[in-house]
């Protein structure tokens, strides 16, 4: 479970952000030109974005509402009298679906690995049409495995050479699906 | 019946049997990978079918992929405690405990045989129900379809998930994605922000790969060090047989009850397999003589949910094939697959391509048999797949995800759209928003809008078209019921003058 006070602050920020985006989208939908009638194309965007704004506002409201477990008590033990929607998390006696053992410490999620993976992904997509599938995928696999904590460079390189070539050959030769060849001489 | 026999005649040709075997093997292989559920498995394997010009072969393969993915998912849940989708969560609870106590073989066997039993019975039910429902569906009008889509949407979000407001926000996000692009009836651009790329709308494959593959991998990357790495060995038990006599005795009841729960819940618009698996688990837990064993590896807790999971799939096919309405994320991907072949599921499908429908149904029987024949004997191979080092595994999944989007759309820009959706999916996972409502919103939203406007076009803008026919009115009344049911305990408590309990009825974990 999240730390109560910190979790609440991010929750408020998230809800407020959703609300702002919703309002902007609503404004964009409402100012578009066209038929806003029941049969027209402009009604649905307005309906959807109004729903977005209402739901986000309600979400913000529940996040701002004072909770039974006061911030600062550390791990939030859900008070039985708490009536917010979000807080009926675990039924007593139900198992934690994430598979945490009861005593297992909650591990703080890291941000570097996902940011790194996103970086390699973007590089992959950019390189794809210039360098070709095989080369870009090979580099991507080595770098991504590294970012994800692999320390077996030789193994990664072998996989990074064999897998893309196998995919490339089976897709282009067997399945007739176009993949950019790029600099790879095949 | 003769149509079904015709279907068997098609499927049992060697070529199609090969398709089924490839599907089952591929599906199991990908489904076994931790964190990958059937919806993503099908989405990732969609490109493989692009070059096939034979829809029958493709759908036979899909049926195999789906069954394989489901079976592979239960293997992962049992041996690694990482359910790839919410329908496997119930299996993981008891299955993993069984595996830890050296009963992995029994857990895997009761899952496999239970899936076979449930799959066979529910496919039989599907063959019986499909035609009559399709006949009934030919009388449906636009207003009815609108009401049905609305019902599917409301039932999904109201019943599944712990937090209504989060589920609603997920659904609304999906609806928003569905509005993007050119309006089908008037050709006007909506939410394209002046870009060409968004004009065609956002493809469901792009969204599924983005949310489930990219988002999920980013999420896993953020907590890589806390993942269970240890695969429970399957041979620690001394028993030579898969299931002891006692295991059989304790399993068959839950199998049948799981099937009985799974099929109708799958067929109703209620979000596929999530609800029935949890219902089955809860039921077995409360009525079992071995209640004390629950939480410590009770075989009933694996047998029931697995059967329900499998039966629900055949159930989901009823509205998908006869009405064209998907009620689970996987069904939404199947619908996308149909549309790649320019086939529109619905009542006309039974008239226009009966050989396809019946071959698909027959292939479900065949896939079931193949699975049983392939899986238990090959369990050692699947365990090897589980032992692929994680960094390599996830790098490979990302390559396939990127490849899948690129092959499906032929555009790097679409790959970037998938990445953006992936980042959003990562955020949703991180903040505990359910994923499945996004997919359903994306599919059902445009369907709803189209039928709503069509109904009004027919009635010249008269809104009473939605209440003047009994069928439409009943469906809309069901929408209201679906909205109220989760709050019944609270309302009843209020009426009795007790302080309101806070629990909504929730069956499943978020996604």
Image (cartoon, coloured by chain):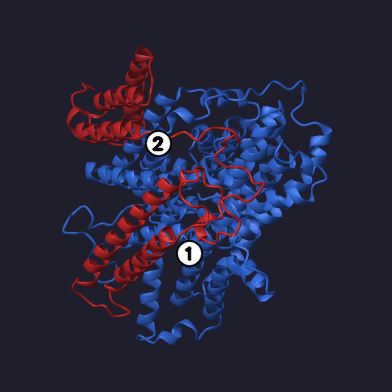
Observer-nearest of A98 and B389 = A98
Observer-nearest of B35 and A96 = A96
Say if B268 sits above or below B27 in the image. Answer: below
The chain letter for the residue carrying disc 2 is: B
Residue at the spot 36% in from the left edge and 57% down from the top edge: A15
Residues marked 2 and 1, same chain: yes
Q: Colour of chain A?
A: red
The N terminus of chain B, quarter of image = bottom right
Q: Earlier in the sequence, mark 2 or mark 1?
A: 1
Asked whether residue B297 is in view, the answer is yes
Name the secondary structure under disc 2: helix
Task: In the displayed orientation, state which residue is furthest to the top.
Answer: A154
Q: For mark 1, what is the residue?
A: B153
Asked whether residue B48 is in view, the answer is no
Separation (CA) of disc 2 from disc 1: 27 Å
Counting from the top left corner in percent of width and height, residue B49 is at 40, 41
Closer to us: mark 2 or mark 1? 2
Residue at the spot 49% in from the left edge and 61% down from the top edge: B164
Counting from the top left corner in percent of width and height, residue A113 is at 34, 31
Residue at the spot 56% in from the left edge and 27% down from the top edge: B382
Observer-nearest of A4 and A53 = A4
**Left or right of A84, for residue B109:** right
Q: Crowding near pointer 1: few (<14 within 10 Å), some, many (20+)?
A: many
Residue at the spot 32% in from the left edge and 47% down from the top edge: B421
Name the secondary structure under disc 1: helix
Counting from the top left corner in percent of width and height, residue B295 is at 70, 39
The chain letter for the residue carrying disc 1 is: B
Q: Crowding near pointer 2: few (<14 within 10 Å), some, many (20+)?
A: many
Counting from the top left corner in percent of width and height, residue B419 is at 30, 42
Q: For mark 2, what is the residue?
A: B217
Say if A35 sits above or below A76 in the image. Answer: below
């Amino acid at each position: 479970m999240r730390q109560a006070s910190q979790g609440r602050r991010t929750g408020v920020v998230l809800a407020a952000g959703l609300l702002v985006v919703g309002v902007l989208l609503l404004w964009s939908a409402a100012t578009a030109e066209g038929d806003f009638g029941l049969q027209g194309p402009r009604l649905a965007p307005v309906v959807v974005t109004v729903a977005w704004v209402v739901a986000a506002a309600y979400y913000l409201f529940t996040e701002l509402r004072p909770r039974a477990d006061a911030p600062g008590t550390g791990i939030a033990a859900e008070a039985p009298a708490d009536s917010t929607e979000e807080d009926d998390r675990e039924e007593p006696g139900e198992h934690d679906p994430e598979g945490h053992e009861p005593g297992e410490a909650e591990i703080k999620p890291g941000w570097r690995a996902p940011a790194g993976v996103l970086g390699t992904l973007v590089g992959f997509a950019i390189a794809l049409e210039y360098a070709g599938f095989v080369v870009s995928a090979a580099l991507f696999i080595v770098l991504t495995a590294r970012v994800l904590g692999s320390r077996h460079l030789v193994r990664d390189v072998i996989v990074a050479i064999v897998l893309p070539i196998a995919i490339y050959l089976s897709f282009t030769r067997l399945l007739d699906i176009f993949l950019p060849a790029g600099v790879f001489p095949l | 019946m003769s149509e079904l026999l015709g279907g068997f005649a098609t499927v049992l040709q060697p070529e199609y049997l090969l398709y089924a075997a490839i599907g089952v093997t591929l599906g199991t292989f990908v489904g076994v990978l931790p964190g990958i559920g059937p919806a993503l498995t099908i989405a990732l394997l969609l490109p493989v079918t692009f070059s096939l010009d034979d829809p029958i072969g493709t759908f036979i393969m899909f049926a195999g992929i789906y069954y394989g993915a489901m079976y592979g998912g239960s293997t992962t849940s049992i041996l690694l405690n990482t359910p790839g989708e919410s329908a496997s969560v119930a299996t993981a609870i008891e299955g993993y405990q069984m595996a830890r106590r050296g009963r992995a073989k029994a857990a895997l066997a009761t899952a496999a045989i239970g899936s076979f039993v449930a799959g066979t019975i529910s496919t039989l039910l599907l063959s019986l129900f499909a035609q009559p429902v399709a006949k009934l569906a030919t009388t449906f009008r636009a207003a009815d379809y609108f009401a049905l889509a609305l019902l599917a949407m409301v039932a999904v979000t109201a019943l599944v998930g712990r937090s209504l407001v989060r589920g609603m926000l997920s659904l609304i996000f999906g609806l928003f994605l569905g509005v993007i692009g050119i309006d089908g009836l008037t050709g006007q651009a909506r939410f394209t922000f002046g870009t060409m790329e968004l004009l065609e709308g956002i493809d469901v494959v792009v969204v599924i790969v983005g949310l489930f593959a990219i988002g999920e991998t980013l999420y896993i990357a953020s907590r890589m060090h806390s993942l269970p790495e240890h695969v429970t060995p399957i041979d620690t038990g001394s028993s030579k047989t898969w299931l002891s006599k006692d295991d059989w005795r304790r399993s068959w009841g839950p199998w049948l009850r799981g099937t009985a729960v799974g099929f109708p819940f799958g067929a109703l618009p209620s979000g596929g397999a999530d609800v029935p698996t949890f219902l089955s688990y809860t039921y077995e837990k409360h009525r079992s003589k071995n209640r004390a064993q629950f939480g410590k590896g009770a075989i009933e807790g694996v047998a029931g949910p697995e059967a329900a999971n499998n039966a629900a799939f055949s159930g989901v096919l009823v509205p998908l094939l006869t009405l064209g309405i998907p009620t689970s994320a996987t069904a939404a991907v199947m619908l996308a697959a149909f549309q790649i072949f320019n086939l529109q599921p619905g009542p006309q499908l039974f008239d226009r391509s009966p050989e396809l429908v019946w071959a698909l149904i027959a292939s479900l029987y065949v896939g079931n048999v193949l699975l049983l024949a392939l899986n238990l004997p090959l369990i050692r191979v699947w365990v090897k797949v589980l032992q692929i080092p994680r960094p390599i595994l996830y790098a490979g999944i990302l390559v396939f995800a990127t490849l899948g989007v690129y092959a499906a759309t032929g555009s790097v820009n679409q790959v970037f759209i998938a990445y953006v959706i992936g980042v959003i999916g990562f955020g949703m996972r991180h903040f505990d928003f359910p994923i499945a409502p996004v997919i359903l919103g994306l599919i059902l939203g445009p369907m709803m809008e189209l039928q709503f406007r069509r109904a009004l076009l027919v009635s010249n803008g008269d809104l009473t078209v939605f209440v003047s026919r009994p069928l439409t009115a009943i469906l809309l009344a069901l929408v209201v019921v679906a909205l109220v049911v989760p709050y019944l305990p609270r309302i009843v408590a209020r009426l009795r003058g007790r302080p309101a309990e806070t629990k909504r009825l929730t069956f499943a974990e978020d996604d």
